[in-house]
Amino acid sequence: MKHYDIVIIGSGWGTKLRPAADKWKKIAIIEDTNLWWTCLNRWCIPSKMLIYPADLVTHFKEDYKKLDIDFSWKIKINFEALVKRVNTEITESSHSIKPVYEKHENIDLYQWYAKFIENKTVEVNGEKLSADTIYIATGSKPQIPRIEWLEGTPYFTSKEALKNSKLPKKMIVIWWWYIAVELWHFYGAAGTDMHFLVRSEMIKNEDKDIRAEFTKDFKERYNLHFWISPTKVEYINNTFFVTVSDKEWNEEVMESDALFVATGVVPNSKELGLENTDIQMNDRWYIKVDDYLETAVKWVYALWDVVWNYLFRHSVNYEWEYLFAQHYENQIKTPIKYPPVPHAIFTYPQIAGVWVIEDELIKEWREVWKDYLVGVNYYKDSAMWMAMRPEVGMVKLISDTSWKLLWAHIIWEKASDIIHMLIVYVSEWFNVEKMIKDMIFIHPALSENIRNAARKLYAQVKK
């Protein structure tokens, strides 16, 4: 049996601890598939490579008339060429990681499945490995709903949707997950007739005002079917037949040549052999950890998807940096303390936010902030609207009654970039009064919407 200082199960997020090998720690990295799996191969990066061209096409198609631009040719996405280029570049990037590991004298790479056989020992392709410290970073995989006859049909998950090189004429999306509105935007911009089965409401984890603004815009572009659930799926002669029912159990059959299932994720934990250890899980197979990201077994840690903290690549980067500093730099054990965590949805229009939403403030944080202030500014009420003329867009700020900024949300172009100004403000509990009186905002610019929202918030009396 080989013994290591560190065993990392999962190369996607596990690579952040690779610098420990430079400190003469002997490391085993275990990955059953492509290196740097989810973000590079199946989600963050390839989806954005497809979405950016979709943004450009949508922008030109929808905005050129109101901006007095005359196009005498048809703008469209070369779907097959784009998907081929993206997947070629992603494969090359993924394959470039392995040689880096192989050249490092303190890293051994095992490309197979890992299974615990006891608390601090795993088995990989018949070989037993033990370690002083083990990090479980196995991530998640698409959750497949229990729909009659769905299994065995050639439906898409995010993996297949990103690699598919044939543009469907019509696609049905079974949705409860953010990547659906991102990839739906891409396919819709490319020319697919998109039909979205929405169980209750769109992007329900977003702020209520952001949800309303987004839904109003999105339903004008695509086909939204609310309060409808799929009950059966058949695939006959290259066609999907999806039986759906409404709240009154009235049924109808919808047809399409593609079906995209985006109903969330489940942790990659069932196959880890955790039943052979003292590691504890909840009833959904998420691993339980303490405030140090440590499992019930000392010096065995778990994080991100497999734990269900914040499901963002940037949040797991923060977790790895915390663990590396705790274990291999300052070596002072302190609990992890998350700063305000931002997020973005790369659909059209973009959505971004930092910290919680007003709905949660009302339901869960009411005892902490019994009174709060809200400032909303719509893009149509700013000077830049006269130049860009967006149909949708807003900034929403929430503060306590002393005007310390607590939360922020944006919808519209470049929201994922503009939100960073507000990440700083929220992280520092910046005073809205100072934003208004002691800062100069460029005129005219999109950032003026933040100032205008701050002015409206500041002008309020207590709620």
Image (tube, helix red, strand yellow):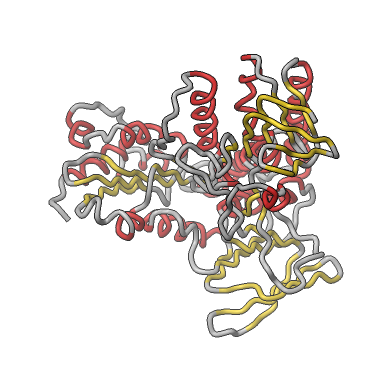
Q: Is residue 369 left or right of residue 100?
A: left
| Rendering quarter of residue 385 | top left
Image position, residue 370 (x, y; %): 21, 55
| Rendering quarter of residue 346 | top right
Relative to 442, does residue 460 appear above or below in the rendering? below
Residue drawn at (22%, 39%) of the image: 404
Image position, residue 30 (x, y; %): 74, 34
Q: Quadrant of the C terminus?
A: bottom left
Count the numbered circles shown.
Answer: 0
| Residue 418 visible in this rendered orientation of the protein | no
| Residue 123 visible in this rendered orientation of the protein | yes
In front: 317, or 296? Answer: 296
| Rendering quarter of residue 395 | top left
Residue drawn at (31%, 42%) of the image: 382
For the view shown, which residue lies furthest in the left direction?
461
Image position, residue 1 (x, y; %): 80, 31
